Image (cartoon, rainbow, N blue to C red):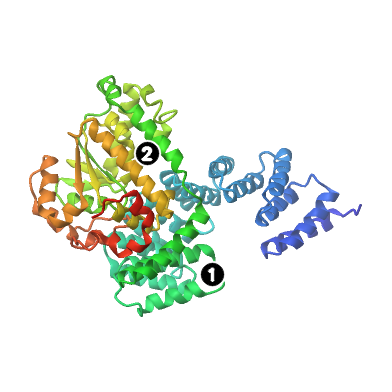
Protein backbone atom coordinates (compact mmCIF):
# COMPACT_ATOMS: atom_id res chain seq x y z
CA UNK A 1 0.00 0.00 0.00
CA UNK A 2 1.25 3.44 -0.94
CA UNK A 3 2.61 5.47 1.95
CA UNK A 4 2.45 9.27 1.96
CA UNK A 5 4.43 11.73 4.00
CA UNK A 6 2.34 14.03 6.22
CA UNK A 7 3.08 16.91 3.83
CA UNK A 8 2.04 14.89 0.77
CA UNK A 9 -1.10 13.59 2.50
CA UNK A 10 -2.05 17.16 3.43
CA UNK A 11 -1.50 18.31 -0.14
CA UNK A 12 -3.74 15.51 -1.46
CA UNK A 13 -6.44 16.44 1.06
CA UNK A 14 -6.31 20.04 -0.19
CA UNK A 15 -6.70 18.69 -3.74
CA UNK A 16 -9.82 16.83 -2.62
CA UNK A 17 -11.20 19.99 -0.96
CA UNK A 18 -10.66 22.03 -4.13
CA UNK A 19 -12.29 19.37 -6.31
CA UNK A 20 -15.30 19.18 -3.98
CA UNK A 21 -15.71 22.95 -3.91
CA UNK A 22 -15.50 23.08 -7.72
CA UNK A 23 -18.15 20.37 -8.06
CA UNK A 24 -15.74 17.73 -9.34
CA UNK A 25 -17.15 15.17 -6.94
CA UNK A 26 -15.88 12.02 -8.65
CA UNK A 27 -12.29 13.32 -8.56
CA UNK A 28 -12.65 14.27 -4.90
CA UNK A 29 -14.09 10.83 -4.11
CA UNK A 30 -11.15 9.01 -5.69
CA UNK A 31 -8.55 11.08 -3.79
CA UNK A 32 -10.36 10.53 -0.49
CA UNK A 33 -10.69 6.79 -1.05
CA UNK A 34 -6.92 6.59 -1.50
CA UNK A 35 -6.25 8.63 1.62
CA UNK A 36 -8.67 6.57 3.72
CA UNK A 37 -7.18 3.29 2.51
CA UNK A 38 -3.82 4.51 3.83
CA UNK A 39 -5.26 5.86 7.09
CA UNK A 40 -8.98 5.20 7.81
CA UNK A 41 -8.82 7.18 11.07
CA UNK A 42 -8.50 10.64 9.47
CA UNK A 43 -11.55 12.55 10.74
CA UNK A 44 -11.14 15.37 8.21
CA UNK A 45 -11.09 12.86 5.34
CA UNK A 46 -14.11 11.02 6.73
CA UNK A 47 -16.08 14.28 7.07
CA UNK A 48 -15.20 15.41 3.57
CA UNK A 49 -16.03 12.00 2.16
CA UNK A 50 -19.40 12.14 3.95
CA UNK A 51 -20.04 15.52 2.31
CA UNK A 52 -19.06 14.22 -1.14
CA UNK A 53 -21.31 11.16 -0.78
CA UNK A 54 -24.18 13.38 0.37
CA UNK A 55 -23.78 15.63 -2.64
CA UNK A 56 -23.77 12.53 -4.84
CA UNK A 57 -27.03 11.56 -3.06
CA UNK A 58 -25.44 8.38 -1.76
CA UNK A 59 -26.96 8.91 1.65
CA UNK A 60 -26.25 5.49 3.15
CA UNK A 61 -22.57 5.81 2.25
CA UNK A 62 -22.49 9.37 3.62
CA UNK A 63 -23.94 8.16 6.92
CA UNK A 64 -21.36 5.35 7.12
CA UNK A 65 -18.42 7.74 6.77
CA UNK A 66 -19.88 10.35 9.11
CA UNK A 67 -20.77 7.80 11.79
CA UNK A 68 -17.18 6.57 11.66
CA UNK A 69 -15.97 10.16 12.10
CA UNK A 70 -18.34 10.68 15.02
CA UNK A 71 -17.10 7.48 16.72
CA UNK A 72 -13.53 8.81 16.56
CA UNK A 73 -14.27 12.47 17.40
CA UNK A 74 -17.74 12.80 18.96
CA UNK A 75 -17.26 16.48 19.89
CA UNK A 76 -15.62 17.67 16.64
CA UNK A 77 -17.69 20.56 15.20
CA UNK A 78 -17.23 19.49 11.53
CA UNK A 79 -18.78 16.11 12.34
CA UNK A 80 -21.94 17.65 13.82
CA UNK A 81 -22.14 20.09 10.92
CA UNK A 82 -21.94 17.39 8.26
CA UNK A 83 -24.43 15.18 10.11
CA UNK A 84 -26.82 18.15 10.21
CA UNK A 85 -26.43 18.72 6.47
CA UNK A 86 -27.08 15.04 5.77
CA UNK A 87 -30.19 15.01 7.98
CA UNK A 88 -31.47 18.17 6.27
CA UNK A 89 -31.04 16.71 2.80
CA UNK A 90 -32.89 13.58 3.90
CA UNK A 91 -35.75 15.65 5.34
CA UNK A 92 -35.06 14.72 8.96
CA UNK A 93 -35.27 18.29 10.25
CA UNK A 94 -35.67 17.20 13.87
CA UNK A 95 -32.30 15.43 13.79
CA UNK A 96 -30.69 18.33 11.92
CA UNK A 97 -31.90 20.80 14.54
CA UNK A 98 -30.48 18.58 17.29
CA UNK A 99 -27.02 18.48 15.70
CA UNK A 100 -27.01 22.24 15.12
CA UNK A 101 -28.21 23.04 18.63
CA UNK A 102 -25.34 20.93 19.93
CA UNK A 103 -22.98 22.87 17.65
CA UNK A 104 -24.20 26.23 18.99
CA UNK A 105 -23.61 24.94 22.53
CA UNK A 106 -20.15 23.75 21.57
CA UNK A 107 -19.23 26.99 19.73
CA UNK A 108 -21.72 29.60 20.97
CA UNK A 109 -19.72 32.59 19.71
CA UNK A 110 -19.61 31.46 16.07
CA UNK A 111 -22.28 33.39 14.19
CA UNK A 112 -22.38 30.99 11.25
CA UNK A 113 -23.52 28.18 13.56
CA UNK A 114 -26.52 30.25 14.61
CA UNK A 115 -27.32 31.05 10.97
CA UNK A 116 -27.29 27.35 10.09
CA UNK A 117 -29.58 26.60 13.03
CA UNK A 118 -31.94 29.41 12.06
CA UNK A 119 -32.06 28.16 8.48
CA UNK A 120 -33.20 24.67 9.49
CA UNK A 121 -35.64 26.02 12.09
CA UNK A 122 -37.09 28.15 9.30
CA UNK A 123 -37.49 25.06 7.13
CA UNK A 124 -39.27 23.34 10.02
CA UNK A 125 -41.69 26.26 10.47
CA UNK A 126 -40.46 27.02 13.99
CA UNK A 127 -40.58 30.77 13.42
CA UNK A 128 -39.95 32.12 16.92
CA UNK A 129 -36.87 29.96 17.46
CA UNK A 130 -35.59 30.78 13.97
CA UNK A 131 -35.97 34.51 14.69
CA UNK A 132 -33.89 34.15 17.86
CA UNK A 133 -31.19 32.17 16.02
CA UNK A 134 -30.89 34.64 13.14
CA UNK A 135 -30.75 37.60 15.53
CA UNK A 136 -27.99 35.88 17.46
CA UNK A 137 -26.08 35.31 14.19
CA UNK A 138 -26.33 39.00 13.36
CA UNK A 139 -25.15 40.01 16.83
CA UNK A 140 -22.11 37.75 16.46
CA UNK A 141 -21.30 39.02 12.97
CA UNK A 142 -21.81 35.93 10.84
CA UNK A 143 -20.05 35.79 7.48
CA UNK A 144 -23.05 36.56 5.27
CA UNK A 145 -25.05 39.30 6.91
CA UNK A 146 -27.28 40.26 3.98
CA UNK A 147 -28.39 36.62 3.68
CA UNK A 148 -29.12 36.52 7.40
CA UNK A 149 -31.16 39.73 7.28
CA UNK A 150 -33.10 38.27 4.34
CA UNK A 151 -33.90 35.03 6.16
CA UNK A 152 -34.79 36.95 9.31
CA UNK A 153 -37.17 39.06 7.24
CA UNK A 154 -38.76 35.89 5.90
CA UNK A 155 -39.42 34.28 9.29
CA UNK A 156 -40.63 37.57 10.78
CA UNK A 157 -43.14 37.83 7.94
CA UNK A 158 -44.22 34.23 8.53
CA UNK A 159 -44.65 35.05 12.22
CA UNK A 160 -46.93 37.98 11.39
CA UNK A 161 -44.36 40.69 12.17
CA UNK A 162 -44.56 42.38 8.78
CA UNK A 163 -43.18 45.79 9.83
CA UNK A 164 -40.07 44.20 11.38
CA UNK A 165 -39.70 41.98 8.31
CA UNK A 166 -39.72 45.04 6.07
CA UNK A 167 -36.92 46.63 8.11
CA UNK A 168 -34.73 43.54 7.80
CA UNK A 169 -35.22 43.21 4.05
CA UNK A 170 -34.23 46.88 3.73
CA UNK A 171 -31.09 46.23 5.83
CA UNK A 172 -30.16 43.36 3.53
CA UNK A 173 -30.52 45.63 0.51
CA UNK A 174 -28.40 48.32 2.16
CA UNK A 175 -25.62 45.74 2.40
CA UNK A 176 -26.23 44.34 -1.08
CA UNK A 177 -28.55 46.41 -3.33
CA UNK A 178 -28.59 43.57 -5.89
CA UNK A 179 -29.80 40.83 -3.53
CA UNK A 180 -32.69 39.33 -5.53
CA UNK A 181 -34.20 37.31 -2.66
CA UNK A 182 -34.30 40.43 -0.46
CA UNK A 183 -36.02 42.35 -3.27
CA UNK A 184 -38.56 39.56 -3.62
CA UNK A 185 -39.13 39.38 0.16
CA UNK A 186 -39.56 43.13 0.41
CA UNK A 187 -42.12 43.00 -2.39
CA UNK A 188 -44.01 40.26 -0.55
CA UNK A 189 -44.14 42.27 2.68
CA UNK A 190 -45.23 45.40 0.83
CA UNK A 191 -48.14 43.49 -0.72
CA UNK A 192 -49.29 42.67 2.82
CA UNK A 193 -49.84 46.39 3.36
CA UNK A 194 -51.74 46.72 0.07
CA UNK A 195 -49.01 48.70 -1.71
CA UNK A 196 -49.28 46.65 -4.89
CA UNK A 197 -47.70 49.05 -7.35
CA UNK A 198 -44.53 49.47 -5.29
CA UNK A 199 -44.46 45.72 -4.68
CA UNK A 200 -44.62 45.07 -8.42
CA UNK A 201 -41.59 47.31 -8.92
CA UNK A 202 -39.58 45.25 -6.43
CA UNK A 203 -40.72 42.00 -8.05
CA UNK A 204 -39.60 43.25 -11.45
CA UNK A 205 -36.24 44.34 -10.07
CA UNK A 206 -35.78 40.89 -8.55
CA UNK A 207 -36.67 39.24 -11.88
CA UNK A 208 -34.12 41.37 -13.74
CA UNK A 209 -31.45 40.43 -11.19
CA UNK A 210 -32.31 36.71 -11.15
CA UNK A 211 -34.41 35.50 -14.12
CA UNK A 212 -34.66 32.06 -12.50
CA UNK A 213 -36.55 33.42 -9.48
CA UNK A 214 -39.86 32.43 -11.03
CA UNK A 215 -41.79 32.97 -7.78
CA UNK A 216 -41.69 36.62 -8.82
CA UNK A 217 -44.12 35.92 -11.64
CA UNK A 218 -46.55 34.23 -9.29
CA UNK A 219 -46.66 37.40 -7.27
CA UNK A 220 -46.94 39.65 -10.32
CA UNK A 221 -49.89 37.51 -11.35
CA UNK A 222 -51.43 37.74 -7.88
CA UNK A 223 -51.39 41.52 -7.41
CA UNK A 224 -53.36 42.57 -10.46
CA UNK A 225 -56.03 41.42 -12.88
CA UNK A 226 -55.07 40.48 -16.44
CA UNK A 227 -57.22 41.37 -19.44
CA UNK A 228 -55.41 39.98 -22.50
CA UNK A 229 -53.47 36.82 -23.26
CA UNK A 230 -51.06 39.09 -25.17
CA UNK A 231 -50.03 40.79 -21.93
CA UNK A 232 -46.20 40.99 -21.87
CA UNK A 233 -46.05 39.20 -18.51
CA UNK A 234 -48.07 36.26 -19.85
CA UNK A 235 -45.89 36.07 -22.96
CA UNK A 236 -42.72 36.11 -20.83
CA UNK A 237 -43.99 33.46 -18.42
CA UNK A 238 -44.94 31.22 -21.35
CA UNK A 239 -41.44 31.60 -22.80
CA UNK A 240 -39.84 30.82 -19.43
CA UNK A 241 -41.98 27.72 -19.06
CA UNK A 242 -40.94 26.47 -22.50
CA UNK A 243 -37.21 26.68 -21.75
CA UNK A 244 -35.86 23.08 -21.86
CA UNK A 245 -33.52 23.61 -18.89
CA UNK A 246 -36.37 24.64 -16.59
CA UNK A 247 -36.50 22.48 -13.43
CA UNK A 248 -39.76 20.95 -12.17
CA UNK A 249 -40.20 23.32 -9.22
CA UNK A 250 -39.88 26.37 -11.48
CA UNK A 251 -42.32 24.83 -13.94
CA UNK A 252 -44.74 24.21 -11.09
CA UNK A 253 -44.61 27.86 -10.04
CA UNK A 254 -45.03 29.12 -13.61
CA UNK A 255 -48.01 26.83 -14.22
CA UNK A 256 -49.73 28.22 -11.10
CA UNK A 257 -49.05 31.79 -12.28
CA UNK A 258 -50.30 31.14 -15.81
CA UNK A 259 -53.40 29.40 -14.50
CA UNK A 260 -54.33 32.55 -12.62
CA UNK A 261 -53.63 34.88 -15.56
CA UNK A 262 -55.63 32.82 -18.07
CA UNK A 263 -58.50 32.64 -15.56
CA UNK A 264 -58.48 36.45 -15.43
CA UNK A 265 -58.62 36.55 -19.23
CA UNK A 266 -61.57 34.17 -19.43
CA UNK A 267 -59.50 31.41 -21.06
CA UNK A 268 -60.85 28.78 -18.72
CA UNK A 269 -59.72 25.62 -20.52
CA UNK A 270 -56.15 26.94 -20.77
CA UNK A 271 -56.27 28.06 -17.15
CA UNK A 272 -57.37 24.62 -15.95
CA UNK A 273 -54.70 22.92 -18.06
CA UNK A 274 -51.98 24.97 -16.34
CA UNK A 275 -53.44 24.54 -12.85
CA UNK A 276 -53.73 20.77 -13.33
CA UNK A 277 -50.09 20.60 -14.47
CA UNK A 278 -49.00 22.67 -11.47
CA UNK A 279 -50.84 20.41 -9.05
CA UNK A 280 -49.47 17.23 -10.63
CA UNK A 281 -45.93 18.55 -10.24
CA UNK A 282 -46.57 19.62 -6.66
CA UNK A 283 -48.14 16.29 -5.76
CA UNK A 284 -45.15 14.45 -7.25
CA UNK A 285 -42.82 16.65 -5.21
CA UNK A 286 -44.66 16.64 -1.87
CA UNK A 287 -46.49 13.34 -1.94
CA UNK A 288 -50.14 12.42 -1.76
CA UNK A 289 -52.73 12.96 0.95
CA UNK A 290 -53.83 10.13 3.24
CA UNK A 291 -57.58 10.74 3.25
CA UNK A 292 -58.33 7.59 5.26
CA UNK A 293 -56.05 8.75 8.04
CA UNK A 294 -57.80 12.13 8.00
CA UNK A 295 -61.23 10.52 8.13
CA UNK A 296 -60.08 8.51 11.13
CA UNK A 297 -58.89 11.71 12.86
CA UNK A 298 -62.25 13.42 12.27
CA UNK A 299 -64.06 10.36 13.59
CA UNK A 300 -61.96 10.31 16.75
CA UNK A 301 -62.55 14.05 17.29
CA UNK A 302 -66.32 13.52 17.05
CA UNK A 303 -66.19 10.52 19.39
CA UNK A 304 -64.04 12.36 21.95
CA UNK A 305 -65.76 15.73 22.06
CA UNK A 306 -69.36 14.76 22.74
CA UNK A 307 -72.00 16.15 25.11
CA UNK A 308 -70.93 13.86 27.93
CA UNK A 309 -67.32 14.99 27.60
CA UNK A 310 -68.11 18.68 28.10
CA UNK A 311 -70.73 18.02 30.78
CA UNK A 312 -68.14 16.23 32.90
CA UNK A 313 -65.28 18.66 32.48
CA UNK A 314 -66.45 21.48 34.78
CA UNK A 315 -64.90 24.98 34.97
CA UNK A 316 -61.83 25.18 32.77
CA UNK A 317 -59.42 27.33 30.80
CA UNK A 318 -59.85 31.09 30.61
CA UNK A 319 -63.09 33.04 30.83
CA UNK A 320 -61.72 35.66 28.42
CA UNK A 321 -63.96 36.74 25.55
CA UNK A 322 -61.12 38.57 23.83
CA UNK A 323 -60.34 35.91 21.17
CA UNK A 324 -62.67 35.58 18.22
CA UNK A 325 -61.95 32.52 16.13
CA UNK A 326 -62.73 32.65 12.40
CA UNK A 327 -62.80 29.14 10.96
CA UNK A 328 -63.80 27.33 7.80
CA UNK A 329 -62.32 25.85 4.67
CA UNK A 330 -59.56 27.82 2.93
CA UNK A 331 -60.96 30.21 0.29
CA UNK A 332 -64.29 30.48 2.11
CA UNK A 333 -64.04 34.17 3.03
CA UNK A 334 -62.09 34.01 6.30
CA UNK A 335 -59.62 36.76 5.25
CA UNK A 336 -62.45 39.02 4.07
CA UNK A 337 -64.38 38.63 7.33
CA UNK A 338 -61.27 39.32 9.40
CA UNK A 339 -60.54 42.44 7.34
CA UNK A 340 -64.11 43.67 7.84
CA UNK A 341 -64.13 43.05 11.59
CA UNK A 342 -60.60 44.42 12.09
CA UNK A 343 -61.83 47.71 10.61
CA UNK A 344 -64.00 48.15 13.71
CA UNK A 345 -62.23 50.39 16.27
CA UNK A 346 -62.67 47.80 19.02
CA UNK A 347 -61.37 44.83 17.02
CA UNK A 348 -57.94 43.91 15.72
CA UNK A 349 -56.86 41.04 13.51
CA UNK A 350 -53.99 38.71 14.43
CA UNK A 351 -54.02 36.84 11.14
CA UNK A 352 -53.48 33.09 11.20
CA UNK A 353 -52.14 31.70 14.48
CA UNK A 354 -51.26 28.01 14.60
CA UNK A 355 -51.07 27.98 18.38
CA UNK A 356 -54.22 25.89 18.92
CA UNK A 357 -53.17 23.29 16.36
CA UNK A 358 -49.63 23.10 17.76
CA UNK A 359 -50.83 22.96 21.36
CA UNK A 360 -53.09 20.03 20.52
CA UNK A 361 -49.96 18.11 19.47
CA UNK A 362 -47.45 19.30 22.07
CA UNK A 363 -49.62 19.45 25.22
CA UNK A 364 -51.64 16.28 24.70
CA UNK A 365 -49.87 12.91 24.63
CA UNK A 366 -52.30 11.58 21.99
CA UNK A 367 -54.79 14.01 20.45
CA UNK A 368 -57.72 13.91 20.68
CA UNK A 369 -57.96 10.60 22.54
CA UNK A 370 -56.14 11.70 25.71
CA UNK A 371 -57.28 15.32 25.85
CA UNK A 372 -59.26 14.53 28.99
CA UNK A 373 -55.97 14.02 30.85
CA UNK A 374 -55.38 17.81 30.81
CA UNK A 375 -56.17 19.16 34.25
CA UNK A 376 -57.39 22.67 35.08
CA UNK A 377 -53.90 24.18 35.66
CA UNK A 378 -52.68 22.80 32.32
CA UNK A 379 -55.67 24.26 30.47
CA UNK A 380 -55.29 27.62 32.21
CA UNK A 381 -51.57 27.75 31.35
CA UNK A 382 -52.24 26.93 27.69
CA UNK A 383 -54.97 29.59 27.52
CA UNK A 384 -52.69 32.23 29.04
CA UNK A 385 -49.89 31.35 26.63
CA UNK A 386 -52.30 31.74 23.75
CA UNK A 387 -53.59 35.10 25.02
CA UNK A 388 -50.00 36.34 25.33
CA UNK A 389 -49.31 35.40 21.71
CA UNK A 390 -52.62 36.89 20.58
CA UNK A 391 -51.94 40.20 22.32
CA UNK A 392 -48.44 40.39 20.85
CA UNK A 393 -50.16 40.49 17.47
CA UNK A 394 -53.28 42.45 18.28
CA UNK A 395 -52.59 44.60 21.34
CA UNK A 396 -54.92 44.99 24.30
CA UNK A 397 -58.30 45.60 22.66
CA UNK A 398 -61.85 44.30 23.14
CA UNK A 399 -61.60 41.54 20.51
CA UNK A 400 -58.71 40.04 18.52
CA UNK A 401 -59.48 37.68 15.68
CA UNK A 402 -57.54 34.50 14.88
CA UNK A 403 -58.46 33.45 11.35
CA UNK A 404 -56.57 30.18 11.03
CA UNK A 405 -59.16 28.30 8.91
CA UNK A 406 -58.18 24.78 10.01
CA UNK A 407 -59.14 25.58 13.59
CA UNK A 408 -62.50 24.08 12.61
CA UNK A 409 -60.75 20.80 13.47
CA UNK A 410 -60.05 22.06 16.98
CA UNK A 411 -63.28 23.73 18.07
CA UNK A 412 -63.58 21.17 20.87
CA UNK A 413 -60.12 22.08 22.14
CA UNK A 414 -60.94 25.79 21.81
CA UNK A 415 -64.03 25.17 23.93
CA UNK A 416 -61.80 23.74 26.68
CA UNK A 417 -59.41 26.69 26.61
CA UNK A 418 -61.96 29.48 26.07
CA UNK A 419 -65.49 28.33 26.91
CA UNK A 420 -66.89 31.86 26.39
CA UNK A 421 -65.03 32.78 23.19
CA UNK A 422 -67.09 33.27 20.05
CA UNK A 423 -66.43 31.47 16.79
CA UNK A 424 -67.39 32.64 13.30
CA UNK A 425 -67.77 29.86 10.77
CA UNK A 426 -67.27 30.91 7.14
CA UNK A 427 -69.19 28.70 4.73
CA UNK A 428 -69.10 28.75 0.93
CA UNK A 429 -70.55 26.63 -1.86
CA UNK A 430 -68.69 23.30 -1.81
CA UNK A 431 -67.68 23.14 -5.48
CA UNK A 432 -66.66 26.80 -5.61
CA UNK A 433 -64.54 26.28 -2.50
CA UNK A 434 -62.87 23.13 -3.84
CA UNK A 435 -62.14 24.75 -7.21
CA UNK A 436 -60.63 27.83 -5.57
CA UNK A 437 -58.40 25.64 -3.38
CA UNK A 438 -57.21 23.75 -6.47
CA UNK A 439 -56.09 27.04 -8.02
CA UNK A 440 -53.96 28.03 -5.02
CA UNK A 441 -50.29 27.35 -4.37
CA UNK A 442 -50.29 26.85 -0.60
CA UNK A 443 -46.89 27.40 1.00
CA UNK A 444 -47.16 24.71 3.67
CA UNK A 445 -49.22 21.64 4.55
CA UNK A 446 -52.60 21.28 2.76
CA UNK A 447 -51.45 18.17 0.87
CA UNK A 448 -55.09 17.48 0.04
CA UNK A 449 -55.12 20.62 -2.16
CA UNK A 450 -53.34 19.05 -5.13
CA UNK A 451 -56.04 16.63 -6.33
CA UNK A 452 -59.74 17.34 -6.84
CA UNK A 453 -60.81 14.00 -5.32
CA UNK A 454 -58.85 14.71 -2.15
CA UNK A 455 -60.17 18.26 -1.88
CA UNK A 456 -63.75 17.05 -2.21
CA UNK A 457 -63.27 14.29 0.36
CA UNK A 458 -61.59 16.74 2.75
CA UNK A 459 -64.56 19.10 2.34
CA UNK A 460 -66.95 16.27 3.22
CA UNK A 461 -64.98 15.63 6.42
CA UNK A 462 -65.20 19.34 7.22
CA UNK A 463 -68.98 19.31 6.68
CA UNK A 464 -69.35 16.31 8.95
CA UNK A 465 -67.32 17.95 11.70
CA UNK A 466 -69.09 21.32 11.50
CA UNK A 467 -72.45 19.54 11.74
CA UNK A 468 -71.16 17.88 14.92
CA UNK A 469 -70.08 21.16 16.49
CA UNK A 470 -73.48 22.71 15.72
CA UNK A 471 -75.26 19.70 17.23
CA UNK A 472 -73.33 20.25 20.46
CA UNK A 473 -74.82 23.72 20.76
CA UNK A 474 -74.20 26.63 18.45
CA UNK A 475 -74.92 29.55 20.79
CA UNK A 476 -71.28 30.70 20.57
CA UNK A 477 -70.90 29.79 16.89
CA UNK A 478 -72.17 32.00 14.07
CA UNK A 479 -72.21 30.73 10.47
CA UNK A 480 -71.73 33.33 7.73
CA UNK A 481 -72.35 32.26 4.14
CA UNK A 482 -69.99 33.78 1.58
CA UNK A 483 -72.79 34.06 -0.97
CA UNK A 484 -75.02 35.98 1.46
CA UNK A 485 -72.11 38.22 2.46
CA UNK A 486 -71.49 39.26 -1.15
CA UNK A 487 -75.22 39.76 -1.82
CA UNK A 488 -75.98 41.77 1.36
CA UNK A 489 -72.74 43.10 2.78
CA UNK A 490 -74.15 45.60 5.26
CA UNK A 491 -76.83 43.25 6.56
CA UNK A 492 -74.37 40.42 7.19
CA UNK A 493 -71.76 42.72 8.74
CA UNK A 494 -74.34 44.25 11.07
CA UNK A 495 -75.30 40.72 12.16
CA UNK A 496 -71.67 39.90 13.00
CA UNK A 497 -71.05 43.17 14.85
CA UNK A 498 -74.22 42.78 16.90
CA UNK A 499 -73.42 39.14 17.66
CA UNK A 500 -70.03 40.25 19.03
CA UNK A 501 -71.94 42.70 21.27
CA UNK A 502 -70.28 45.73 19.68
CA UNK A 503 -71.78 49.04 18.69
CA UNK A 504 -72.17 49.60 14.95
CA UNK A 505 -69.36 51.45 13.19
CA UNK A 506 -69.49 52.30 9.45
CA UNK A 507 -65.72 51.73 9.21
CA UNK A 508 -66.57 48.03 8.83
CA UNK A 509 -68.01 48.77 5.41
CA UNK A 510 -64.93 50.78 4.42
CA UNK A 511 -62.63 47.81 5.00
CA UNK A 512 -60.70 48.37 1.75
CA UNK A 513 -59.17 51.50 3.34
CA UNK A 514 -57.78 49.52 6.27
CA UNK A 515 -53.99 49.45 5.84
CA UNK A 516 -53.35 46.63 8.31
CA UNK A 517 -51.02 43.91 7.10
CA UNK A 518 -52.66 40.92 5.39
CA UNK A 519 -50.25 38.13 4.53
CA UNK A 520 -52.64 35.41 3.37
CA UNK A 521 -53.23 34.35 -0.22
CA UNK A 522 -56.25 36.70 -0.25
CA UNK A 523 -54.18 39.84 0.39
CA UNK A 524 -55.20 41.33 -2.98
CA UNK A 525 -58.87 40.36 -2.78
CA UNK A 526 -59.45 41.90 0.66
CA UNK A 527 -58.35 45.29 -0.71
CA UNK A 528 -61.13 45.14 -3.33
CA UNK A 529 -64.82 45.96 -2.91
CA UNK A 530 -67.02 42.91 -2.42
CA UNK A 531 -67.81 41.32 -5.77
CA UNK A 532 -70.11 38.46 -6.75
CA UNK A 533 -68.11 37.16 -9.72
CA UNK A 534 -66.73 34.32 -7.58
CA UNK A 535 -70.23 33.03 -6.81
CA UNK A 536 -70.90 29.94 -8.94
CA UNK A 537 -67.47 30.30 -10.50
CA UNK A 538 -67.45 26.52 -10.87
CA UNK A 539 -69.81 26.76 -13.85
CA UNK A 540 -66.97 28.15 -16.00
CA UNK A 541 -65.05 24.93 -15.32
CA UNK A 542 -67.97 22.49 -15.28
CA UNK A 543 -66.48 20.26 -17.99
CA UNK A 544 -63.42 19.61 -15.79
CA UNK A 545 -65.16 19.02 -12.45
CA UNK A 546 -66.91 15.70 -12.87
CA UNK A 547 -65.43 14.21 -9.69
CA UNK A 548 -66.57 17.18 -7.58
CA UNK A 549 -70.04 17.22 -9.11
CA UNK A 550 -70.40 13.54 -8.20
CA UNK A 551 -69.44 14.29 -4.59
CA UNK A 552 -71.71 17.37 -4.43
CA UNK A 553 -74.53 16.71 -6.93
CA UNK A 554 -77.10 19.29 -5.81
CA UNK A 555 -75.70 22.41 -7.47
CA UNK A 556 -78.80 23.62 -9.33
C-alpha span from label 1 to label 2: 37 Å
Task: In this rendered view, identify the residue nearer to me: 355 or 261.
Answer: 261
- Residue 121 spot, x, y in % from top left: 48, 46
Find residue 256 and report its image quarter: bottom left
Kindly identify which numbered label has been placed on residue 357.
Answer: 2
User: Is 259 rendered above or below residue 554?
Assistant: below
- Residue 456 spot, x, y in % from top left: 37, 49
Image quadrant in which the C terminus is located: bottom left
User: Is 260 rendered above or below residue 164?
Assistant: below
Mark 1 neighbour class, 10 Å CA radius: few under 14, some 14 to 19, many 20 or more:
few
Task: In this rendered view, identify the residue nearer to me: 468 or 213.
Answer: 468
- Residue 32 spot, x, y in % from top left: 78, 55
Q: What is the residue that sits farthest to the right in this orientation?
A: 1
Kindly identify which numbered label has been placed on residue 142.
Answer: none
- Residue 431 visible: yes
- Residue 164 visible: no
327 relative position to 131: left or right: left
Total number of numbered discs in the rendering: 2
User: Is 309 rendered above or below residue 226?
Assistant: above
Q: Residue at x 35, y 27 (%)?
A: 304
Q: Residue at x 55, y 52 (%)?
A: 112
According to the picture, the residue beneath numbered tag 1 turns out to be 246
131 relative position to 348: left or right: right
Which is more N-terminal, label 2 or label 1?
1
- Residue 356 spot, x, y in % from top left: 34, 37
Amino acid sequence: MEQLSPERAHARLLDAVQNEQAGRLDEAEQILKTLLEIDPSQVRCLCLMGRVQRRLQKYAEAARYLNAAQAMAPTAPPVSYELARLATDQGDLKAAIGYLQYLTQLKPMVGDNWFDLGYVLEMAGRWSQAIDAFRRAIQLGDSNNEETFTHLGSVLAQDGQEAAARENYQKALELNPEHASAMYGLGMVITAFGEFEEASQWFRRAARRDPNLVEVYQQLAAVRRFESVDDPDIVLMTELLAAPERDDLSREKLHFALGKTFDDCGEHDRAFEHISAANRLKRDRKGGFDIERHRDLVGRIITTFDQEFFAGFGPRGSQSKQPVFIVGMPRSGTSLIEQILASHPRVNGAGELRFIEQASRTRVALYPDLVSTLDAPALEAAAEDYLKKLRERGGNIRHITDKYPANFLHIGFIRLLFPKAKIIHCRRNAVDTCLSIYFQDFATANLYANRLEDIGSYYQCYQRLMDHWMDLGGDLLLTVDYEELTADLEGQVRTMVEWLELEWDPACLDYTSNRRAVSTLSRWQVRQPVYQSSVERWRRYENHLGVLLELFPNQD
